[in-house]
């Protein structure tokens, strides 16, 4: 997608599956990193089309501002029924990125220094961190991480006759995560049927049923998570209490040298976090040709139903459950999206003139209903349902709803397959906006010229395709809360057991659509019978009327209000080069793409920068530009941290240091390189992904490289390098001392790093058995393969994974793993 | 076939009709502003919403009083979660999230109260007394929140007789651009609101809501803070009014009184209930160590159910404070040594609600404070006999001997009263303001004994850091405050 085009509204693309806009993203209320798209079995997908330019997205214009991803699932073909059986087995490990932490002798020595530097006597040092502690050196990372196994089995059948075609599939996917107690399972089934009742009437059904079940440990930034714990538990403690041979709980005095006071090895399995999603996604559709081969009426009714259950249990014997004597939380969520679409299709050729047109109406309604209940007071960890809770603690729930109505039209015309023109206009309304500005019109025009089809190009036979194209158009974005335009009082509060009402939102009747104005020009060239294909494209996308939480004086009782005031420009180049380097028995193809995007904020509320703790959005700079105090290493005399001042000097008083813009999380360019080689049934492909120039804030480092701020947590191994120890030392890190050294670990450029990387995303080696071997067997096709993911990464980023940053900030996110997979595919 | 076309056409028409209706959706858990404040019952519900705002973590739920406690010489910060370190070290900037959060929370409470105050003229149901009570509570809430803001974000009145910049006094909810009122203006408006509230509130609503006595008690405090001779007389008058019909909790009941809420000597407490359990963010957890019931029961002697605590144990009593507590002082029992942690912790906020560790109903105004307000005002007025009598009531209740004229002369009486105030109100967020409003310096005797990162050992009265910076986001969003940042925070 072409850059971030919104500041507060969503910048997710729109997902369309088999012609119906579907839910994407996170519908859960308490589970991080879930996406309902995980319910789709990737093997059911026939094609994925990414629509970016104005003309292409016009059909989905209401919400197409961030681009459209069109997914088409597999369909049957008439003829013999084809079965495909797939089986996969894989293992996942953590990557070779930087997870290194201090060993026990290193940490004991470091901690003693922290205390000594803070003025403690030798006696305190010996009491707090006796040297004998270093005799125990436990690897907590290995206790938090594991080798995860993946199993995947699927069977599909495709076939049909002249009148009816079908595709059926069933799949089972079971993946163990690389952190303990994290698993993902998916059961999926699909049926796609198309029936041609007469030569004018056809109808069909697409139906996907799936169930996913995801078990996770606590989110990475919590004390009892295996990720934070694995990285930060002190190695001189082990999970087992040597006096009792039982696992520590964490709250015992004997475990008090740990900051977290929580032994995740014991507690994580006792505190499951479960998320499951039953999804029914489908549509029924009909098509009737009113005028044969010219005018057709199409109708489609879609349902996307998600039933989500979330369960989290905190065992009474774990530190988080001690006070409440155990806690269980159930959340049940139903999310329904109903879509209806009525379209008229027109297609006609008059000589060399070809005309097609679409006109129609679309309505979509979404309803979200959720309830949650919490109970506390559990006898033991065996009975976890709410019935076993002694105290019903809280119960709540809410419903919310939105709807969209659209009228759309599009006309396309071409002459002699040389000149193409297309234009569209649509009108969209959304319940989300203020009564004054609910409706908006969007339009687009596009054209292309296939000059290689011109007679004068016959002189250049090496040019198999030559095309120049361009488009201009507008699209909308409505990814905001459902009732943001209304002035509201909420009755969710309570005081002393009595409901309390509070103003929850200021009225905003003028709130309206965000609008994107995009234009692009491109050229497509195919050379030497399309052995070389090249595309270059320049685009500009101005996102206007952006909804901004305009900060307002807190004396209003609120800190911000949404206004349509912002503007952002994304402008860039995209190049794609596909080449067939060798053809024949040995085939080698190369696909290369690279994108350059420049993001610039053009306008904000009163052009006032929106400043957060780490980043700001300011006119003239990219969205979320890092805006930090500029850390300048330790003061050689005192060892105190220093930050740069405006005048180029230094200050060791954090509050006096000014903040500067220090780069953006967006890469200057990114892209991929794929090579496919094959020789007589043996195939090898490898795919590199690269990203250059984005900055990452190592927020994990703020905790794990913190000069004593978090005494009792282990630290990254690098924390003892390049640090100030005595006057005269020129060092990056300040003197480490108990309690931290003058805000040295507070937000500053100290933790800002180059996030560029190259990663070998995928390598696949496959072998397809020759037909000669299969001719006497029942099999029509047999393929075996081995696949590796994320096997190699090159980066200067010091944190544990450059790919784990969200908006440029990496903070204890579940890391991707290195995966090795072996698979078998049999057709019969 | 025709049937299919027909039904499709009918279906289409059905969908096309009433499109406008399809976009008219109403939320199901909120009411529009007009509907929310159109009856007495709803105004009362909105008042509960204001108390709910006081309960915010950023305000009386923890941060506001604890910031001031961290400023003081009563505590040191031990092994820590990083919280309140900046307050302890006086190292906050205008972006400091905790004080920004308090600023926002206080003005949110003010907005809620203002909506009620401004809706009352249009409400006709309910009795006049009922309506007056609700209006009086709203005025009290507005006054208290402004008073707390001016304490935190401005220098004390005594520094320049209130000429310095205070905070904007807000009486209407709007997206405005108000400038800062002077400290003197804020005090005048606080007192005017409180006096009106005191007259209006006549109903017995219990001590978990604002009431006439709470207004009287708060008036005694506000006048004490303003501190002119006329004010000191008002302190005495309002304290006398508030005390009528109330009595101090006895020595025998004193400890137990802190382990349940609704204290007999409270004028106004902010009531927390069991389902407001915030886990790690419970008020008391900033003081309490993580300790199991067993360790507790074996080592700590307090008249309460022992509960597992998962506290941070960040704020610990300073040796200086512990040294001021005689072993016969009943209040010394709040400070207990915890094995395993090998340090002293304070247990005043252990559990008051449903035996949940750290969950308490903060006591906003209580009689002991009012008695000490009066003692201090009388001492300043030269009414030494009355001042000494009040001081000795607090002392003897604590188990300490009376301070007779022979033991402490009148010249030193005020200092004794302030020291007693320090002991009686310890950890309740008074000490730092008490020093500053009296023009006294903060001198930390423990400084250096236990490490703190910045090592703020002395903050003199009048130091720019006494007034917290106006939050940067307010300066940025409000042109009316351009150039009105407090000195010392880079304009």
Image: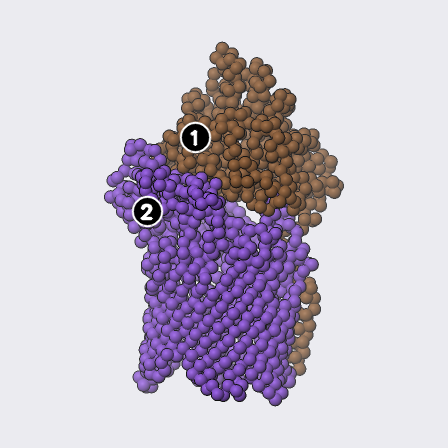
View extreme (top): residue = B406
The subunit carrying tag 2 is: A
Lateral position of residue A596 relative to residue B49, left or right:
left
Whether residue A92 sits left or right of residue A509 in the image: it is left
- Above or below, comparing residue A645 to residue A42 in the picture: above
Report if the CB atoms under discs 1 and 2 are less than 8 Å apart.
Answer: no
Chain colored brown: B
Residue at left offset 52%, top offset 85%: A453
Q: Residue at x 49, y 64 (%)?
A: A597
On screen, A686 above or below B50? below
Residue A764 picture quarter: bottom left
**Going 42% across and 81% down the picture, which residue do you hit?**
A531
The quadrant holding residue A250 is top left
Q: Which residue is mark 1?
A: B457
| Front in this rendered view, residue A524 or A772 | A524
Q: Which chain is purple?
A: A
Instruction: Residue A712 in the image: state x and y as whole percent.
Output: 35, 42
For mark 2, give the secondary structure: loop
Question: In the rendering, which numbered label is found on residue A606?
Answer: none
Respond whether the residues carrying marks 1 and 2 are from the same subunit: no
Q: Which residue is mark 2?
A: A722
- Label 1 marks a residue whose chain is B
Other-residue count near label 2 (Cα within 10 Å), few / some / many at <14 / 14–19 / ≥20:
some
Q: Measuring from the top left, give residue B491's x and y in whole percent.
A: 55, 40
Q: In the image shown, does A644 or A122 lie closer to the viewer? A: A644
Q: Position of residue A123 (x, y in %)?
A: 29, 32
Residue at 62 percent of width and 38 percent of height: B180
Asked whether the viewer can see residue B144, the reply is: no
Density class for disc 1 (Cα within 10 Å; few <14, some 14-19, many ≥20) is some
């Amino acid at each position: 997608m072409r850059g971030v085009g919104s500041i507060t509204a969503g910048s997710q693309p729109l997902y369309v599956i088999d012609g119906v806009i579907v839910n994407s993203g996170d519908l859960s209320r308490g589970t991080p990193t879930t996406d309902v798209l995980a319910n789709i079995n990737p093997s059911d997908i026939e094609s994925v089309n990414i629509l970016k330019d104005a003309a292409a997205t016009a059909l989905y214009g209401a919400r197409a501002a961030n681009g459209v991803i069109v997914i088409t699932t597999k369909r049957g073909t008439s003829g013999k029924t084809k079965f495909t059986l797939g089986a996969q087995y894989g293992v996942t490990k953590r990557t070779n990125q930087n997870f290194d932490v201090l060993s026990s002798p290193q940490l004991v020595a470091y901690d003693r220094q922290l205390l000594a530097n803070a003025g403690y006597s030798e006696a305190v040092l010996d009491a707090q961190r006796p040297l004998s502690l270093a005799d125990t050196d436990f690897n907590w990372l290995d206790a938090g991480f594991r080798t995860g196994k993946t199993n995947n089995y699927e069977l599909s059948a495709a076939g049909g006759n002249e009148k009816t075609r079908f595709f059926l599939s069933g799949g089972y996917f079971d993946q163990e995560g690389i952190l303990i107690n994290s698993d993902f399972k998916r059961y999926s089934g699909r049926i796609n049927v198309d029936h041609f009742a007469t030569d004018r009437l056809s109808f069909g059904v697409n139906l996907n049923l799936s169930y996913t079940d995801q078990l996770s440990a606590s989110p990475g930034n919590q004390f009892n998570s295996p990720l934070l714990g694995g990285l930060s538990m002190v190695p001189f403690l082990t999970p087992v209490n040597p006096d009792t041979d039982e696992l520590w709980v964490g709250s015992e005095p004997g475990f008090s040298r740990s900051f977290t006071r929580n032994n995740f090895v014991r507690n994580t399995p006792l505190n499951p976090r479960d998320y499951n999603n039953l999804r029914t996604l489908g549509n029924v559709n009909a098509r009737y040709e009113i005028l044969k081969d010219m005018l057709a009426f199409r109708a489609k009714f879609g349902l996307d139903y998600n039933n989500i259950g979330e369960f989290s249990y905190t065992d009474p014997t774990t530190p988080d459950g001690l006070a409440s004597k155990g806690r269980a939380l159930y959340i049940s969520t139903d999310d329904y999206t109903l879509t209806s679409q009525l379209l008229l299709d027109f297609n006609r050729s008059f000589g060399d003139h070809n005309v097609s047109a679409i006109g129609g109406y679309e309505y979509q309604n979404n309803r979200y209903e959720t309830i949650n209940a919490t109970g506390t007071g559990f006898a033991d960890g065996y009975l976890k349902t709410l019935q076993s809770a002694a105290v019903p603690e809280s119960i709540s729930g809410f419903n919310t709803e939105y709807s969209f109505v659209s009228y759309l039209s599009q006309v396309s015309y071409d002459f002699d397959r040389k000149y193409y023109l297309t234009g569209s206009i649509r009108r969209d309304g959304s319940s989300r906006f203020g009564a004054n500005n609910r409706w908006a019109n969007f339009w687009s025009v596009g054209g292309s010229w296939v000059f290689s089809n011109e007679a004068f190009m016959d002189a250049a036979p090496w040019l198999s395709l030559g095309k120049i194209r361009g488009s201009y158009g507008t699209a909308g974005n409505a990814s905001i809360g459902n009732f943001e335009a209304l002035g509201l009082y909420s009755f969710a509060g309570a005081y002393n057991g009595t409901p309390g009402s509070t103003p929850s939102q200021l009225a905003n009747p003028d709130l309206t659509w965000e609008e994107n104005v995009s234009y692009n020009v491109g050229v497509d060239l195919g050379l030497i019978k399309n052995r070389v294909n090249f595309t270059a494209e320049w685009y500009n996308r101005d996102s206007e009327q952006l909804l901004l939480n305009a900060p307002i004086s807190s004396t209003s009782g609120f800190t911000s209000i949404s206004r349509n005031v912002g503007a952002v420009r994304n402008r860039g180049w995209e190049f794609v080069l596909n080449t067939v380097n060798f053809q024949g028995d040995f085939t080698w193809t190369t696909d290369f793409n690279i994108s350059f995007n420049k993001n610039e904020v053009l306008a904000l509320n009163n052009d006032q920068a929106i400043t957060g703790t780490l980043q700001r959005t300011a006119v003239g700079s990219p969205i979320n530009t890092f805006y930090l105090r500029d850390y300048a290493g330790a003061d050689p005399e005192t060892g105190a941290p220093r930050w740069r001042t405006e005048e180029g000097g230094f200050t060791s008083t954090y509050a006096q240091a000014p903040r500067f813009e220090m780069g953006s999380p967006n890469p200057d360019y990114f892209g991929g390189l794929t090579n496919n080689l094959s020789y007589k049934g043996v195939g090898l492909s490898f795919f590199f992904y690269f990203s250059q120039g984005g900055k990452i804030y190592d927020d994990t480092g703020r905790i794990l490289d913190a000069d004593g701020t978090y005494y009792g947590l282990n630290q990254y191994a690098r924390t003892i390098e390049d640090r100030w120890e005595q006057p005269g030392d020129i060092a990056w890190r300040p003197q480490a001392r108990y309690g931290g050294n003058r805000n040295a670990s507070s937000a500053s450029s100290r933790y800002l790093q180059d996030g560029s990387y190259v990663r070998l995303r995928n390598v696949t080696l496959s072998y397809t058995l020759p037909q000669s071997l299969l001719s006497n067997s029942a099999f029509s096709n047999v393929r075996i393969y081995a696949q590796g993911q994320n096997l190699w990464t090159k980066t200067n980023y010091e944190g544990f994974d450059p790919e784990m940053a969200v908006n440029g900030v990496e903070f204890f996110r579940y890391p991707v793993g290195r995966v090795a997979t072996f698979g078998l595919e049999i057709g019969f | 076939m025709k049937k299919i076309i027909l039904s499709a056409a009918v279906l289409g028409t059905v969908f096309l009709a009433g499109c406008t209706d399809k976009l008219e959706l109403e939320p199901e858990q909120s009411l529009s502003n007009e509907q929310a404040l159109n009856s007495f019952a709803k105004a009362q519900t909105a008042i509960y919403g204001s108390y709910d705002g006081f309960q915010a973590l950023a305000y009386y739920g923890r941060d506001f009083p604890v910031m001031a406690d961290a400023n003081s010489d009563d505590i040191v910060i031990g092994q820590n979660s990083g919280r309140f370190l900046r307050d302890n070290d006086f190292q906050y900037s205008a972006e400091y999230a905790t004080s920004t959060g308090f600023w926002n929370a206080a003005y949110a409470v003010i907005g809620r109260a203002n909506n009620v105050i401004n809706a009352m003229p249009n409400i006709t149901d309910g009795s006049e007394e009922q309506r007056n009570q609700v209006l009086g509570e709203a005025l009290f809430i507005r006054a208290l929140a402004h008073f707390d803001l001016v304490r935190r974000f401005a220098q004390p009145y005594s520094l320049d007789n209130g000429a310095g910049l205070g905070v904007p006094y807000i009486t209407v909810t709007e997206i405005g651009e108000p400038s800062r009122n002077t400290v003197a203006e804020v005090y005048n408006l606080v007192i005017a609101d409180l006096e009106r509230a005191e007259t209006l509130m006549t109903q017995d609503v219990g001590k978990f809501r604002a009431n006439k006595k709470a207004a009287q008690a708060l008036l005694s405090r506000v006048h004490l803070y303003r501190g002119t001779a006329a004010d000191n007389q008002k302190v005495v008058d309002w304290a006398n009014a508030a005390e009528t019909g109330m009595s101090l909790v006895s020595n025998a009941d004193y400890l137990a009184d802190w382990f349940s809420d609704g204290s007999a000597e409270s004028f106004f407490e902010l009531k927390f209930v069991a389902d407001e359990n915030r886990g790690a963010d419970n008020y008391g957890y900033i003081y309490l160590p993580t300790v199991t019931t067993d360790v507790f029961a074996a080592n700590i002697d307090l008249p309460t159910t022992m509960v597992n605590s998962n506290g941070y144990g960040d704020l610990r009593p300073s040796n200086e404070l512990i040294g001021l507590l005689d072993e016969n002082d009943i209040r010394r029992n709040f400070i207990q040594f915890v094995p395993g942690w090998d340090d002293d912790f304070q247990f005043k906020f252990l559990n008051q609600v449903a035996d949940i560790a750290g969950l308490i109903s903060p006591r906003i105004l209580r009689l002991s404070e009012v008695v000490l307000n009066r003692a201090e005002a009388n001492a300043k007025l030269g009414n030494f006999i009355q001042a000494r009598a009040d001081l000795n009531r607090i002392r003897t209740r604590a188990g300490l001997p009376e301070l007779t004229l022979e033991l402490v002369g009148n010249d030193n009486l005020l200092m004794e009263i302030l020291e007693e105030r320090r002991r009686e109100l310890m950890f309740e967020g008074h000490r730092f303001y008490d020093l500053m409003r009296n023009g006294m310096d903060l001198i930390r005797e423990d400084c250096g004994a236990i490490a703190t990162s910045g090592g703020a050992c002395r903050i003199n009265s009048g130091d720019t850091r006494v007034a917290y910076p106006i939050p940067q986001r307010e300066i940025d969003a409000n042109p009316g405050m351009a150039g009105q940042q407090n000195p010392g925070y880079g304009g």
